[in-house]
């Protein structure tokens, strides 16, 4: 099986490996933004409130497990699609077909005994919260009666395009609210590594490529210094997180395959989707 096909299967199944403690993220609860408490226990996942309205919403994950982390992928089923349809596509050896049945928001990694939050622009429909360490949980998002909350005010905008990043060349150190948005036509992710000041773009590209396996798993002996990873996000989706980056030089890359170039499927990184930026 082609290595990049393995990566697609990993995406569809929601098998994300986000390294515990490699980035610093603050939980968000801005004024006027509804918050849903996602309680993760050994018995499963519960949502409070159980009915979630569409719009800008903060998902506050609380993992009270003693050992197992929550490793999650958040997807919305396309209209008319059922969870069984997705699993049938995968079971028939059609991971690309399965991927086309869902919208990818991104995901979350929450070590045991900790909390973490992300803010998303949820759309009405059936959603699946996939957790590698437990059965998937379904939750429904219904149309909102009102106008909904406004987008959080962001310090940094990270835009995904085909095949580049829209990101400032210099970012302030310390806590910054990042608005992550996909304005391209393909799905994208963000792998951010810290690099030496004299690292070339070619060297940064090579380092970024060592972070994940073809299945999307974190490479424990990678020479790259990973500080943040935002999982695959589909076109039109938005997310907000708070990062606390130290001063230094960083590189950002996307390792996802280009699905339009079947069967070779060169990665976005190979298309030049990498940037170097400073934090001061």
Image: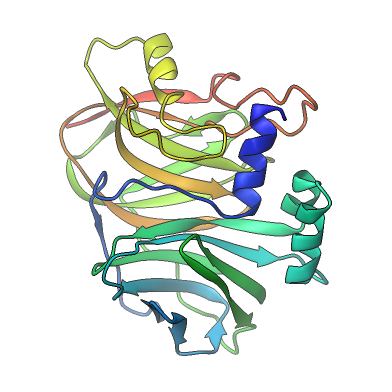
Q: Residue at x 53, y 84 (%)?
A: 52
Please provide percent x and percent y for residue 3.
64, 28
Question: Where is 41 relative to 277, above or below?
Answer: below
Can residue 98 be seen at all in this image of the molecule?
Answer: yes
Q: Residue at x 55, y 71 (%)?
A: 135
Among the 4 quarters of the image, the one containing residue 227: top left
Question: Where is 58 relative to 223, above or below?
Answer: below
Judge left or right: residue 246 versus residue 176.
left
Q: Residue at x 67, y 75 (%)?
A: 126
Question: Where is 139 relative to 150, above or below?
Answer: below
Q: Residue at x 76, y 53 (%)?
A: 90
Question: Where is 200 relative to 136, above or below?
Answer: above
Judge left or right: residue 269 versus residue 190.
right
Please provide percent x and percent y for residue 279.
22, 32
Q: How many marks?
A: 0
Q: Foreground: 157 or 272?
A: 272
How was the colour assigned to the protein in this rendering? Answer: rainbow
Please provide percent x and percent y for residue 239.
46, 57
Judge left or right: residue 253 versus residue 142.
left
For the N terminus, which image quadrant? Answer: top right
Among the 4 quarters of the image, the one containing residue 215: top right
For the C terminus, which image quadrant? Answer: top left
Q: Foreground: 270 or 11?
A: 11
Can residue 123 be seen at all in this image of the molecule?
Answer: no
Please provide percent x and percent y for residue 156.
34, 46
């Amino acid at each position: 099986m082609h290595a990049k096909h393995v990566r697609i299967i990993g995406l569809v199944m929601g098998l994300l490996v986000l390294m515990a403690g490699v980035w610093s993220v603050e939980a968000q609860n801005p004024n006027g933004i509804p918050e849903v408490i996602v309680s993760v226990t050994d018995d499963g996942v519960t949502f409070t409130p159980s009915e979630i309205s569409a719009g800008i919403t903060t998902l506050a994950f609380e993992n009270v497990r003693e050992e197992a982390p929550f490793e999650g992928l958040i997807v919305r089923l396309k209209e008319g699609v059922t969870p069984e349809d997705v699993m049938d596509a995968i079971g028939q050896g059609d991971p690309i077909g399965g991927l086309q049945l869902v919208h990818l928001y991104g995901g979350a990694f929450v070590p045991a005994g900790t909390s973490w939050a992300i803010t998303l622009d949820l759309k009405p429909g059936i959603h699946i919260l996939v957790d590698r360490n437990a059965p998937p949980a379904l939750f429904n998002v219904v149309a909102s009666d009102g106008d909904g909350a406004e987008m959080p005010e962001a310090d940094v905008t990270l835009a995904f395009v085909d095949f580049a990043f829209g990101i400032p060349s210099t970012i302030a150190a310390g806590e910054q609210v990042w608005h992550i948005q996909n304005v391209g036509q393909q799905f994208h992710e963000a792998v951010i590594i810290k690099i030496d000041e004299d690292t070339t773009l070619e060297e940064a590209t090579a380092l970024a490529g060592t972070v994940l396996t073809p299945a999307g798993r974190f490479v424990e002996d990678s020479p790259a210094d990973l500080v943040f990873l935002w999982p695959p996000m589909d076109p039109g989706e938005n997310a907000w997180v708070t990062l606390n980056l130290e001063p230094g030089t960083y590189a950002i890359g996307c390792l996802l395959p280009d699905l339009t170039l079947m069967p070779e499927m060169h990665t976005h990184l190979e298309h030049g989707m990498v940037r170097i930026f400073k934090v001061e």
